[in-house]
Image (spheres, rainbow, N blue to C red):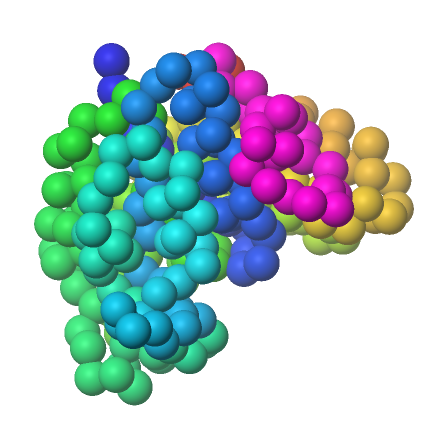
């Protein structure tokens, strides 16, 4: 039975792609077919084949089902800025319907384990009237929340979880990505997150010298997902 999830973060630079790649790798190790996609990406590099994003490529590397780059990352922008600003500067309208159609093709592959990765936090704008969260709503996907563990993360995590619930989506699980290991009272903060977030913790990922997908996967538990 295929499972598909939307990967969201409590903020930008909290390690969404690192965790997503780890989850995909963990699924592959279990013998599941995998597919990851990143519908919108800014901070891309121009190559001979066009704009390419390192996050999208990391998902491709851990996907056993192979699609074209453009199918995995249909909207790519060069500046490392907010997607709606990058799109406006490029003269492109980011519409939920277009993103949903592109991701619908990804989901139609019916991989055993599919991840659609967002950008930044839950309320990242796509345009003047839509947010990236509207894509998750349109796709009706349960959400895996990546919590960047540092000072202030409890507030960010709880507000994100509240917004996800308000949008009518299930928080399927969350991952503690410890991006600041010297955070004061780290264990107490992790315990507070576990007590207050209404979903299982899929793993605590420490600060790794080499955060490769296989290294991250060792700290994750897919069997806690519904």
User: In the drawing, does residue 2 fall left or right of residue 95?
Assistant: right
* Viewer-nearest residue: 108 or 12: 108
* Viewer-nearest residue: 7 or 138: 7
Percent across and percent down for residue 12 are 54, 59
> What is the count of numbered marks?
0
Q: Up-down: is 64 above or below 96? A: above
Give the image quarter of residue 106.
Answer: top left
Residue in the image at 35% along x and 19% along y: 32
Percent across and percent down for residue 77 are 33, 73
Residue 33 visible? The answer is: yes
Q: Up-down: is 82 above or below 22? A: below
Q: Up-down: is 195 above or below 87? A: above
Q: Magenta span has 97? A: no
User: In the drawing, does residue 52 fall left or right of residue 10?
Assistant: left
Q: Quadrant of the C terminus?
A: top left
Q: Residue furthest front?
A: 48
Residue in the image at 50% along x and 15% along y: 224
Residue 84 visible? The answer is: no
Give the image quarter of residue 170.
Answer: top left
Give the image quarter of residue 19.
Answer: top right
* Viewer-nearest residue: 133 or 75: 75
User: In the drawing, does residue 185 fall left or right of residue 71?
Assistant: right
Q: Up-down: is 129 above or below 36? A: below
Percent across and percent down for residue 182 are 86, 48
Q: Quadrant of the N terminus?
A: top left
Q: Which residues are magenta?
A: 201-223
Q: Magenta span has 208? A: yes
Percent across and percent down for residue 60 are 35, 45
Residue in the image at 20% along x and 84% along y: 91
């Amino acid at each position: 039975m295929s499972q598909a999830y939307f990967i969201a973060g409590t903020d930008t630079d909290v390690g969404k792609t690192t965790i997503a790649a780890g989850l995909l790798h963990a699924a592959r190790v279990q013998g599941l077919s995998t597919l990851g996609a990143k519908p919108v990406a800014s901070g891309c590099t121009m190559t001979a084949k066009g704009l390419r994003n390192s996050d999208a490529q990391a998902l491709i590397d851990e996907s056993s089902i192979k699609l074209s780059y453009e199918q995995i990352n249909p909207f790519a922008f060069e500046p490392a800025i907010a997607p709606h600003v990058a799109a406006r500067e490029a003269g492109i309208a980011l519409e939920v319907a277009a993103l949903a159609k592109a991701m619908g093709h990804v989901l139609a592959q019916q991989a055993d384990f599919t991840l659609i990765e967002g950008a930044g936090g839950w309320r990242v704008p796509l345009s003047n009237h839509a947010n990236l969260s509207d894509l998750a709503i349109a796709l009706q996907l349960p959400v895996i929340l990546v919590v960047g563990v540092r000072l202030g993360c409890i507030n960010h995590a709880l507000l994100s979880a509240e917004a996800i619930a308000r949008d009518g989506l299930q928080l399927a699980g969350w991952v503690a990505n410890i991006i600041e290991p010297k955070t004061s009272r780290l264990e107490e903060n992790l315990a507070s997150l576990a007590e207050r977030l209404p979903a299982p913790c899929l793993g605590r990922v420490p600060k790794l010298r080499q955060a490769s997908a296989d290294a991250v996967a060792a700290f994750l538990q897919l069997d806690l997902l519904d």
